Image (spheres, grey):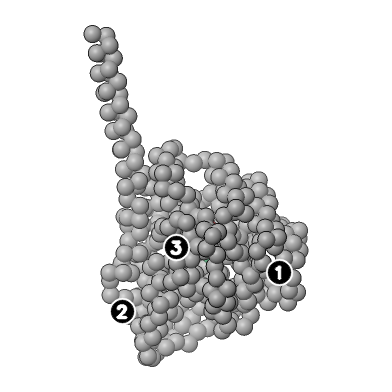
Amino acid sequence: MNRRKFIKGLGITSVLVAGGGVWRAHNQGVFATGEGAAYQEWHNWKSQNKSGLPGLVQSAILAASPHNTQPWLFQLSESSIDIFADSSRNIGAIDPLLREMHIGLGCALENLLLAAKASGYSYKLDYFPDESKPEHAIHIDFSEGDALSSSLFHAIPHRHTNRGPHDLTTPVSTNQLQTLSMLGEQFSKAKLIWLNKGKPTFDFLNLNAQATDELIHDEEQSMSSFRWFRGGWDELQEKKDGVSIDTTGIPMAMRVAGKMMPVLSRQSGDQYFLDAMKNLTNVTDRVGIITVEDVADKTQRLQAGRYWQRMHLWGTTQQLAMQPVNQVSERIDRAFSQGQQSDFSREIQNLISHDEWQALMPFRIGTPLREALPSPRRLVREVIV
Ligand SMILES: Cc1cc2nc3c(=O)[nH]c(=O)nc-3n(C[C@H](O)[C@H](O)[C@H](O)COP(=O)(O)O)c2cc1C
């Protein structure tokens, strides 16, 4: 009798535990990756008619941005669009000089212009048209032109930052590296520098891990970064921004486990981040660095953002994995904002070994071993003012 009661009790407990697990899994979006309001705009791009100027914004918002802050606002008139920086969406101590925010605005601009060409608009661009309003980043006048759809335009809803490991047995080809370099030819003040495999790549990734270590031990930087982590599914669906477990590049079983567990603390998240950055030397095929003449020049940052977006779209057509790795820049700018000069400035310039170019944004690229998943997006109507 006792044994029977015990087994029965065990059965009920198992059902309850399993039921609780399913409930938690449901609440944490385990069965809904890429679904819900936070992902609606990715589906809309594919299914909806993108005509008129609002249709261009539909493409712009699917661009990359630092920590997925989407720091943009769009003002539309009959034949023009103005893009404004939304400074309330700056990452604080991570991006005190707004380097990344401007690059992100450039990314959105590139998508918008590809969509404009595909819709038969020609355009005239003005960067920072009003010196007294630094948040007014871009003014674009549109007129009728020839429709020119491109493979880059069609790649817009398929581009996702891939933080996973690379297949080191299938390196990025020399032809692909050359094409990526050529994609930026129109930007005379931006240039791509590839680090050689072996020591230079290894040195950079070690530098990046050191910078990550410093960053997570700088309480203000750690907190500024954590503010954009969306560990809870409800928060993610409500805010529709930030970085989430689904986009970390870890295997599916770990993603499920990560969602089922209590939301990660800042300290645990920082430790995971550092371990991941230390491991990059084992899982990275290539490192490139977007350089510009002057990292403080806002227009050059916008152009570098356009270049990154264009490269990433082209990389998407080639099924390549791409991920910016910016901790060195983030430490350099943090030191500068505190009136100091970081040693990382000199060390990264040594790696580039070109005096006339300054490192703006390093990234890694390779053949993916895992698929990258979409990140949340605010709705078009939420970013049009
Ligand atoms: C200026 C800039 C800096 C970025 N820095 C990093 C970085 O250091 N590490 C990283 O994993 N992703 C980085 N990203 C990628 C963003 O986190 C990513 O674009 C954002 O989360 C949206 O996701 P998606 O690109 O997949 O659409 C950066 C993107 C931009 C535009």
Residue 232 seen anywhere in this rendered image of the structure: no
- Give the mark nearest the N terminus, 3 or 1: 3
Type of amino acid at the residue the image marks with label 3: His
- The circle on residue 352 is 1
Q: For marks 3 and 2, give the one nearer the viewer.
A: 3
- Give the mark nearest the N terminus, 3 or 2: 2
Q: Quadrant of the C terminus?
A: bottom left
Residue 370 seen anywhere in this rendered image of the structure: yes
Q: For marks 2 and 1, give the one nearer the viewer.
A: 1
User: From this viewpoint, which residue is outermost toward the front?
Assistant: 169
Residue ID for mark 3: 160
27 left or right, relative to 334: left
Residue 155 location (% of width, % of height): 40, 72
For the residue with label 3, is its CB less than 8 Å from the closest atom of ligand 1? yes
Residue ID for mark 2: 51
Q: Element under label 2?
A: loop
User: Could you classify mark 1 by the number of other residues whose Cα lies within 10 Å: few (under 14), some (14-19), or many (20 or more)?
Assistant: some
2 left or right, relative to 91: left
Question: Between residues 223 and 1, which one lies in front from this camera angle?
Answer: 1
Q: Quadrant of the N terminus?
A: top left
Q: CA distance from mark 3 to mark 1?
A: 27 Å
- Give the mark nearest the N terminus, 2 or 1: 2
314 left or right, relative to 341: left
